[in-house]
Image (tube, rainbow, N blue to C red):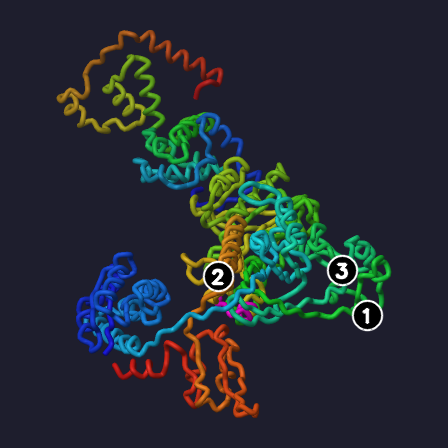
Amino acid sequence: MSRIGVFVCHCGENISRTVDVEQVAKAAGEIPGVAYSCDYKYMCSDPGQTLLKKAVAEHKLDGVLVAACSPRMHEKTFRKAAEAAGLNPYLCEMANIREHCSWVHEDRDMATAKAKDIVKLMVERVRKGKSLAPITVPVTKRALVIGGGIAGIQAALDVADAGHHVIMVERDPSIGGHMAQLSETFPTLDCSQCIMTPKMVDVANHPNITLYTYSEIEKVEGYIGNFQVTVKHKARSVDESKCTGCGVCMTKCPKKKIPNEFDQGHGMRPAIYVPFPQAVPNTPVIDRENCTMFQSGKCGVCAKVCGPGAVDYEQKDTFTVEDVGAIVVATGFKLYTIDRKPEGSPIQGYGEFGYGTIPDIIDGMTFERLASASGPTGGKILRPSDGKEPKQVVFIQCVGSRAREKGISYCSKVCCMYTAKHTMLYHHKVHDGQAYVFFMDARTPGKGYDEFWRRAVEEEEAVYIRGMVSRMYQRGDKIVVMGSDIQVGTQVEIEADLVVLATAVQPQDGADLLAQKLGISYDKYNFYSEAHAKLKPVECATAGIYLAGACQGPKDIPDTVSQASAAAAKVMTLFAKDKLERDPVVAKVNEKYCVGCFACKKVCAYGAIEEKEIRDRQGNLVKKVAYVNPGVCGGCGTCQATCPSKSIELDGYTDEQIMAMIEAL
Amino acid sequence: MKNKLMHLSNETMNIGFVKKVEALSGSSVRRCFQCGKCSAGCPMSTFMEHPPNRVVRLLQLGQGQRILAGRSIWYCASCETCTTRCPNKVDLAAIMDALRKLSWDADGPSKESYVQLANRLFIENIRTYGRQYELRLGAAFNMKSGQFLKDLMLGPKLISKGKLKMFHSKNKNIAEIEGIFKRIEEMRKKGEAL
């Protein structure tokens, strides 16, 4: 006869509001085999845990059931308490009477009856439970950082400085990301390049960092502490080991009129190029789609002028497999465009702003490039259509953001501040110009942020107009902006020379595909999901994978750097131990009954099932059976449900336990 | 005028006028972030077509003419509740004063209200008697505004309760008060006072 203890939690009022916890505890006490039952206001609190430990000792309990919240919330807490009381932690289970009962029901009597049932069946599971020992797995102390923007750079430098090897993978030819494109940064107006480029160089020179640019993640296998990542190195057509970065190829390339992506298409670059002069690495790449050699087979100028003979038209994509223990995902963001979107897309463009057909309506990043000393205009604010200096500039906030009808309901967080910054930059560069800003709310929480915005209004003479713009169209060489000032209560019309849109921050293209490779979750916008919005903001639900920067949601530079350092700290915590303890809830094969059909292998999402040969003493093959690698098994139970001969079982969720639970009902 | 489409450009925004208001009032209009606290506490707000916050807003947009075309500034009682409570230290009462002065300078007495008439008679009364002689002020206001019988029946009640004196008593220091008026006139000529 077992001696089980049942502890029913009130969770303040979260449970007791709809469930009569005293009755549940009383009913539990009457189940055969339950030696002790009680209820308590906060079981997870220190006195609550003490109550549990005392009861285990006093009543000689051999199993514990805590009827409270979801095991995702507090299973660890109570298993630890049970372990401290001398029980095997896996003999402590939780009955979820909060998320599965009190939160979703209103009728007190029915909810109480349901809670009693949940407790009753979970008691059976505890009764049939077995002691388990945690599995230890080795930890590969190398980290992978995906993305070479400020988030990835910060995370990589922090982990590398702690003495661990880091592999950084960047999709573009250079690291630096969006921050390298910015002119000046709020709220201090320090030059972005000046604070960014030294960090980029640090990454390139760091003995603990291996940098792969122009590379992508092809495949991710394994689990926390033991990932195998296949990296695809796209053919650069330039041998990195030979190239000295002299730049002769770029000056001699006959094809020079290709819009430069780094300048938002407003500057020009040759077909063999580095995105910007401060690029890291300073090794050019051939844009094969625009290269005459690749398109027509005639040219080859760059190969001829290259002294070290680094240009290699025959180069192919290559692949390497990297063993890493932790992954930091820092893939960043892209900006929404007002263009017409494809049919059926959940996100819409702005027809009322001309769907991006008016050349002098630009986005914030383009304005950054115009204001940047290294930009296509050398830092002069000149409008794209005719190169004239605009005297009336209209800035519009919340374009795409907070526009449910356009498909994006979130706030992009950075636009209020960068628009204030833009008005200042404009005022500094065009003294007789006037900046207008149409806005709904000025959201400027952050150290020194509100003061910065007020400075734009009070000292830099930006005219802020609370209200949105309904329509914009070209009239002569002006753009007519029709808006409203809801504070005055009138319509406003401005003939603008240039319009700058603060467009929404969106996840990078392909963010969903990468998430699928990594096995991490993402929201409906493709932003990656953290494990807990408040308490696990940098961890993914998938162990060993961490998030940094705007790939998780819109973020400014200070927040991004903070999160990147936090992710790095998490990686270092993981690397602080040589072995990692894993939950022993894994599948086990009964080799006696296994017929070797390997149906389990086909359904296993983790690739944990291997084929194992059983031989007799003479070495003759008797049969092949399935074997579960406990380090890889995710404990999902799919194999157990699939196995036709019932010879594979998940510890902690055995058929015996589940049948007992069903019978209890 | 109130709801007319507003064209904004360097030409249509009369920033010079705003600078004058700022100089006269000694208060910045750009500091205001339109929280609405001034209008929330203003006892006259319900009578104004532009409540106090909107007066500042129109100044921010260089739309002084829209304010002067209305009667808001003449309804301001100068109670200074707005100035006292403003979180941004915008001295709205002083701005209202400045606007009234600029309006007077530009267009003379407003046809919108009798406030200026009352103000002028009030001041003249003090200059003549050295203190307020309410009976005469009331009589003069009724005569000049053409509302001869306005509030006439209140007179006997106020007199019987001693709130209104039948006969004035001149201030002993009337000469010094005249000195104050003279000095202000001098300052006005030099542009040192409103």
Magenta stretch encompasses residue A47:
no
Q: What chain does mark 3 sit on?
A: A
CA–CA distance in space, label 1 to label 3? 27 Å
Classify the position of the N terminus of chain A by image quarter.
bottom left
Q: Is A581 or A407 nearer to us in this picture? A: A581
Residue at 30% of width from left, 27% of height from top? B146
Q: Is A325 on the left-hand or right-hand side of B122?
A: right
CA–CA distance in space, label 1 to label 2? 43 Å
The magenta segment is A514-523
CA–CA distance in space, label 2 to label 3? 45 Å
Callout 3 amino acid: Ser
1 and 3 marks in contact (CB < 8 Å) = no
Disc 2: CA contacts within 10 A as few (<14), some (14-19) or many (>=20) = many
Question: What residue does disc 1 label?
Answer: A296
- The x and y percentages for residue B131 are 27, 15
Q: Is A274 on the left-hand or right-hand side of B4?
A: right
Question: What residue does disc 2 label?
Answer: A408
Q: How many marks?
A: 3
Q: What is the quadrant of residue A589 in the picture?
A: bottom left
Q: Look at the image and tell me whether residue A349 can be seen.
A: no
Disc 1: CA contacts within 10 A as few (<14), some (14-19) or many (>=20) = few
Which numbered disc flags the more N-terminal residue, 1 or 2?
1
Numbered tag placed on residue A241 in the rendering: 3
- The x and y percentages for residue A339 are 59, 62
Classify the position of the C terminus of chain A by image quarter.
bottom left
Magenta stretch encompasses residue A519:
yes
